[in-house]
Amino acid sequence: MLFRSMTAHAFLEFVMPVLAWVDDIAMPVSCIEADSLDATLAQVMLIMHQVFNRFGLRLNLSKGKTEAVVHYRGPNAAQLRRARFLEHFSHLEVPGKEPLRIVTQYVHLGISFARDCDIKTDVTTKIGKATAAYRSLHRPLFGNKRIPIAIRLKLLESLVLPILFYGAGSWPLLPMQLCTRLSAVITRWQRQIIGNGYWIEGSLSDQALRARWKIPELALRLAKHRLLFLLQLRHHGPAILWDCLTAEDGSTSCSWLTAVRQALRWFFSMQNAESMPDLTCESIVRWAFEAPATMPKSIRRAVHRHLMQEFTAHQVVQAHRDLKSMCLSYGVVFENVTVSQASPLISFDCSECCKSFSTVQGLNAHRWKQHQTIDRKSTRLNSSHVKRYRMPS
């Protein structure tokens, strides 16, 4: 979110705030013209040296300590980028001081910032850290058959996934490829712990596996993190941050507020709201500031209710399958009902757009790829299209 805020600051000519935490500090510097970025950055470094010297401190300019992530945008950006990284060997000369090291990626407070302002760098870094943590604990914990599966899944949720979802509340809408990769990594760990992989006979689908063990899917996790982060901004977010967020929401369709808007739609659907409110920027900010102190508990209860609904639906489907299997074992013959393509058995409509699907799997795949939503209550079952009831196979 830092880089997007920097863009909004440069466009709206805001005063850049300083992000500090104990002994770490981030200095966002933005310019309207790319040609003036180097001079402005050198001037900022001189001021920082003066401030440090005033308190008897020395600025550490070694590798990995004090570095700058520079992103040139606008006219002459390509020439400036080539000169900085090729001709000057990724260094910025500061008059009378040591040169400043220019990097393409920097980790600040556990969050990776890249010059291309892409969330993919941060997510990819967290996947690597979480994978290393999982491998180090696989033999003593996750692969230990003496520990019940439910406890091992809880250990995964408490020891590995917090590394993966650190700062996930501030993530904007993720690209489809990144969502698929992130979900595949988590599902692979869960299948290894449960012992129900794709390589065995009778393997459950990903959705059935999560419903069976009451595991939240990726979209549900992100919705919870974003809503909780929104409530934290109510207490700790400065006013200038809300200005940046609203400015970003009007400039891109993949903003953080767009993701929060989808999370709120899911939350209101779980609260059985009679009417969906108009989720504008003003209404979202008003909801965050008017939310009671018990709202975080309500969000967690909504997640638990969602998991219980998925578990109940899975139990019903499994009971139908067991009943059919028992009937077949006693010689009961079921009539095979053929459905013509011109008249589908069931029609599932997307609440976000006008598309319709013949299967709930197709609808869920569409909602995930196009809208990144997980609300299945909004799907409408057209009973007029039902020709004959069929036992689930």
Image: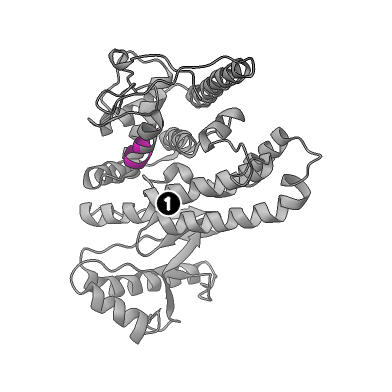
**Residue 370 forms part of the magenta stretch:** yes
In the image, which residues are magenta?
366-373
- Residue 336, position in %: x, y? 44, 21
Note whether 328 is above or below 153 in the view shown: above
**SS at badge 1:** helix
Note whether 381 is above or below 141 in the view shown: above
- Residue 79, position in %: x, y? 24, 79
Residue at the spot of label 1: 178
Nearest the eye: 100 or 315: 315
Note whether 123 is above or below 169 in the view shown: below
Which residue is most to the left?
75
- Residue 333, position in %: x, y? 53, 16
- Residue 288 showing in the rendered view: no
Amino acid of disc 1: Leu
Q: How many marks?
A: 1
Kindly identify the residue that appears in the image at 44 percent across and 35 percent down. Answer: 223
Q: Main secondary structure of the magenta part?
A: helix
- Residue 167 as seen in the image, left or right of residue 85: right
- Residue 338 showing in the rendered view: yes
Which residue is most to the bottom?
87
Q: Quadrant of residue 69?
A: bottom left
